[in-house]
Image (spheres, grey):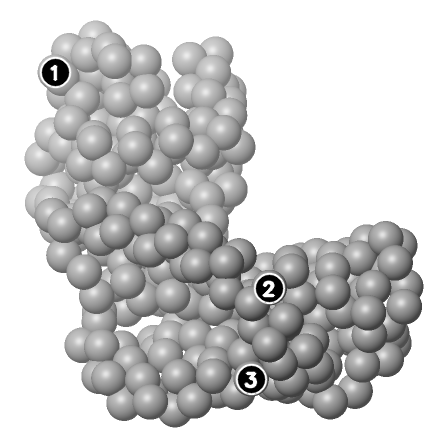
Amino acid sequence: QVYIVVLAFESLGQGDSGVGFLNSAMGVGALLGGVVALSLTGSSRLSLPFAVGVLGWGVPLILLGSHPEMAVALALLAIVGVGNSIMDVAAFTLVQRAVADEVLARVFGVIQMLWWLALAFGALVAPALVGWLGIRTALVATGSALVVLVALLWRPLRAIDARAVAPEATELRILASVPIFAPLPGMSLEHLAGRLVPLRVDSGTVIVRQGDEGDRFYMLVEGKVEVSEDGKPISSLDAGGYFGEIALLRDLPRTATVTASTPVVLYALDRDDFLAAVTGHAPSAQAAEDVVSARLAGLPTPEIPLSSA
């Protein structure tokens, strides 16, 4: 932000309006980068997108110091915005893959603390750097430092990426197709995919029993199940169906019994993982409430289009 203000006033001669335009260019770039970053969900490797994101900061800063013109500055700062979005998504997703669940929250806490310290450090150093070198040289120096940093850390970054476990594409597609999970960001879907429990159940097996405590949410991948209340069949679910959300979301005993009519394959998601993902994200919570309300009213709910999975 210090660089943008000095650049707008001193190098470009645009004043306050220039600051606004330059910040807007970064904002537009960030939105575009967010769209691009959606494609990173499920990617087998994230070290390259992360490095590209960092270079999306470094290279434009070098060029900006070399060509301080308004049109060029707008284009380059838009690229910075794109790079920032890609870098953020790739970095946090890679950390989530590489770090054990038991310490993940603490690691994210440390990262957040380091981020704020870096912001404070930058706010102190940037004015001094501009005063010492001038804005153009300061931009080139900062951009060059980022490029060198990528070169130095490339091999260890690749090693971390190689050890990290990426989720299966099929699991991600199934999760993203469930209306309750569809609004979740890609990083949350990846986390849930890593928590899924695959199950194979023989025909005639009771999967959930009316009156029992709800402990899991289920997604039916293969086979058919029968849903009954008070011993009377009320509906059936084929591959693509899902069940178990009412007891979890309303904190009630199971409202129906679900029995395998054929041998079935399911994915199960434990109560805590389900509730943390759904209730912590407003659009997902609303989608879940819509599903629960529809089922309690006896209305149909969308099934998962497994033909594309």
User: Looking at the figure, which quarter contains the N terminus?
Assistant: bottom right
Compare marks 2 and 3 and give the one earlier in the sequence: 2
Kindly identify the residue that appears in the image at 60 percent across and 64 percent down: 127
Location of residue 276 in the rendering, given as x and y in whole percent from the top left corner = 30, 33
The amino acid at mark 2 is: Pro
Compare marks 2 and 1 and give the one earlier in the sequence: 2
Q: Is residue 231 above or below residue 144?
A: above
Q: Nearer the viewer, mark 1 or mark 3?
A: 3
**Which residue carries the number 3 mark?**
141
Foreground residue among 212 and 127: 127
Location of residue 96 in the rendering, given as x and y in whole percent from the top left corner = 27, 58
Q: Is residue 271 above or below residue 250?
A: below
The amino acid at mark 3 is: Ala
**Which residue carries the number 1 mark?**
212
Q: Is residue 121 above or below residue 79?
A: above
Marks 1 and 3, how far apart at CA: 64 Å
For label 2, the crowd category at 10 Å Cα-Cα, with few meaning under 14, some 14 to 19 and many 20 or more, is: some
Q: Are marks 1 and 3 in contact (CB under 8 Å)?
A: no
| Left or right: 97, with 119 as reference point | left
Foreground residue among 52 and 5: 5
**Which residue carries the number 2 mark?**
127
